[in-house]
Image: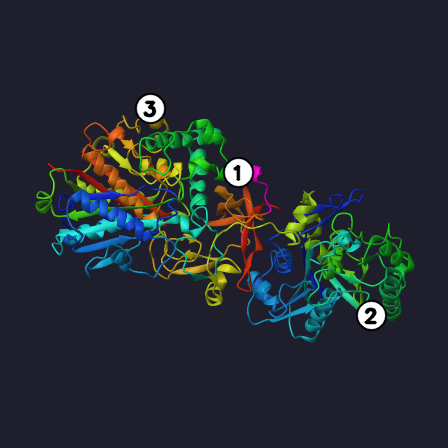
Amino acid sequence: MAGITSYGAYVPLWRLSREAIMKGLLGEKAIRNFDEDSTTMAVAAAIDCLKGRDREAIDGLFFASTTAPYKEKQIATTIAAAADLRRDIITADFSNSLRSGTAALRAALDAVKAGSAKQVLVVAADCRMGAPGTDFEQNSGDGAAALLIGDSDVAVEIEAWHSLSNELHDIWRRDDDNFIRSWEDRFIYSKGYIDTVAQTVSALLQKCNLSSDDLTKAIFDAPDTRRHGELSRKLGFDPKARVQHHLFDVMGNTGTAYPLMLLVAALEEAKPGDRLLLTSYGNGSDACVLHVTDQVEKIRDRQGMKGHLATKRIVDDYRTYLQWRGLLTFESQPTLSGGNISSSAQWRDRNQIFPLHGLKCRACGGIHYPPQRVCPQCQTKDQFDEVRLSDKKGKIFTFGADNLCTRLEAPRVTAIIDFEGGGRMATMMTDRVLEEIEVGMPVEMSFRKLSSQDGIHNYFWKSIPLRS
Amino acid sequence: MEGIKDRVAIVGMGCTKFGELWDKSDQDLMVDSCHEALADAGIELNDIQAAWLGMACIETGFGGVRLARALKTDYIPVTRVENYCASGIEAVRNASYAVAAGIYDIALACGVEKMKDSGATGITQMGGEPHFSSWVWAPIVAPARYALSATRYFHAYGLSPEEGRRLLAMIAVKNHHNGSLNPRAHFQREITIEQALNAPIIAWPLGLFDCCANSDGSAAAIITRPDIAKNIRDDYILVKGLGISSGAGTQGVIAADYDYLHTDEVVRAGQMAYNEAGIKDPRKEVDIAEVHDCFTIAELLDCEDLGFCGRGKFKEDIEAGTFDLGGEVAINADGGLKCFGHPIAASGLRMLFESYLQLQGKAGPRQLKDPTVGLAQNYGGIPGGGVCGVAIVGCRD
């Protein structure tokens, strides 16, 4: 039987304290840094999921989001490049629905069952925005999850599936909307969310000849804590005992990644033999029954939800959040003139940029970055092997913090890092607090958006203080 | 290889005031510096048979005609040269080799830059990258590059950030003192260590007074053979050594074992020039050295790289006054880049101008006692991808 063979997740380091939005609000929500987007978060979750895996064996990648940074340019290919996968694989983007994550999961499952692929990576990421002053602003968070689907050493079998579609304008965004739109609460939640999910689950359980009592735990995505409780009780699950915690107080609703992130959180606690119910909602509902096997014990060493939720820094100034979202801009000073991003240069450098390949010289063994045809150590020409540096940890050799930079970055920290195993790289450092940086500090690499210019989102790796 | 020692002489020099020269274009500055050099040499424009223009700033794609049109030379060969911050010394080098080869009798080298027309504070462009690129690299522009060395220098020699910053402040104080004695400098006032320490941070750990200014300026030199020089003036000076070292990517930022405490291009260019000049002990034999203090830490590293003090020993020397006007080697006697700013291609020639004045006994309140050997050094780019120029001049026998 096909199912989940590995999982991963990513929650941004930064949490906006809800009190910063409005006095009296509780908890925090996960917010991406100014240099993160759905693509970069997806890369982080994917790499977490692929820990210890042979990346050459992955033959499919499906990406799901409602906040892809392009309307016409595949994101799955970017993630595949950054994750250093082969090129002869199936890639596709699933978009436009909060159900896209589970839709991608279903498609991956079908692909493996049909024999079109052996190992498909499903990655979902979202960073939706609610308009300032709305519940959506308070409730939505940013994050990503990844599931590897295969048919051997399956840790979580997906036993049954049911879907219902629901054509309705309840919660939506047009292609040029920044903020979530919705119709009146009582209507949308009764005729949309509650009704549809309830019907889907009911049909699924009937299909399988199961009752809610046969399930160890339910995993429900939900628009807010109130509907989460309402749905749980309606379906016969005590929200305090047999339902995966909704994480609104520490993370928020992370859009199409949300059901998969909650699933990962549940799997981190699940025991072999557990039978789980997973639902999602977005113009319809997907529901499935999952059966946990003993293989689940072998895939626990991921950062996942636990590791990422535990490492955090609080943003307690609402203006910082607004700046990071581009909702509040300061007049910018002249900064680097740079040049024009050349697509052909980017393509030529693709292995250096996306999977961060350096070179190891066959003559002297020295590793260097960026790749040079002539070895900087022994001057041997064209005798090298490519070596992936993106998953290597390192230490800071020296650093500086330049105030002549864009206001968002200020200051721009340049850190020279020495990779374990060899090789050195001049990096920009993000997710850092200046006063805490010191020579010798351990770091790892994170895929980020450097800039958007000439109509291109320019991605590259930055160093971050060690999070894992 | 023969070397350049004593084969060419400088018989005239000019140097404009450096500063925020809003009402002077690059053409105006070239006319000012070159005509001052001609007047100093007592020769006419049409005596010049070839000219080299150093102009490095941001723009590219224009030639030597920029100088020719400004001066209205009579269809002589004029070539623009560019080698980052060593462009001025590169202009002198090209003119010197042409004269030494016997192709021309009298040549002109001029450096000029209008930094203030860019509207930006500091150098905004990353050197070394082609205009079209993937633009992913960490932008290690000037302050950042030197901040990296400062952080590492403090760490390597056991200096706390406070001790380290204080050491750098001493360099700024020394150079401001020298600049206060120089009517051509952009900044002519003294500063204190406290002022330097309390100034805003530009690129941690470097503060405002650790950074040289952004300024406009121009300087020029007239170069000929010694046998012709004898008929022009008695106190001509001789070129003793010229070195240019281009960063090779075998050290510096790419190398896994680069220590950030030295710059190979500077060491190598220094060695080339010292070998040509026959100098074995720079600290003893060089009287005045104008080194590239774009940042205070740069002056420190340059002094160690050029052999004016041992590795890690700069602190004891500057505290002992070794590098003051009255010390063993006067470093940046005219106020340095600190007080003149850095109009890129003009700096090397401005540095030579100070040695020229000093060797002729015309440096006024900055005059050293009987100097006979002067050095000028510039460095541009990042280690492993930078270029250093060193020029050594001396009195005639």
Region of the chain picked out in magenta, as a range: A431-438
Provide the residue designation for mark 1: A438
| Of residues A257 and A148, the one drawn nearer to the viewer in this rendering | A257
| Residue count near mark 1 (Cα–Cα under 10 Å), binned few <14, some 14–19, many ≥20 | some
A357 or B2: which is nearer to us?
B2
Comparing B351 with B153, the one in front is B351
> Taking A183 as reference, is B193 left or right?
left
Please state if A286 lies on the left or on the right of B297 as rendered. right
For residue A86, above or below residue B377: below
Where is B85 relative to A340, above or below?
Answer: above
Say few, some or many: other residues with alpha carbon within 10 Å of mark 3 (under 14 / 14 to 19 / 20 or more).
few
**What residue would you read off at disc 3?**
B320
Q: Amino acid at mark 1?
A: Glu
- Residue at screen point 68% across, 71% down: A112
Q: Amino acid at mark 2?
A: Leu
How far apart in space, not on screen, are marks 1 and 2 (Cα)?
54 Å
The N terminus of chain A lies in quadrant? bottom right
Classify residue A281 as left or right of residue B87. Answer: right
Q: Is residue B376 magenta?
A: no
Mark 2 lies on residue:
A168
Numbered disc 3: secondary structure: helix
* SS at badge 1: loop
Foreground tag (1 vs 2): 2
Spatial CA span between label 3 and label 2:
82 Å
A433 inside magenta stretch? yes
The answer to whether residue B55 of the structure is visible from this angle is: no
Q: Determine the chain carrying the residue at label 3.
A: B
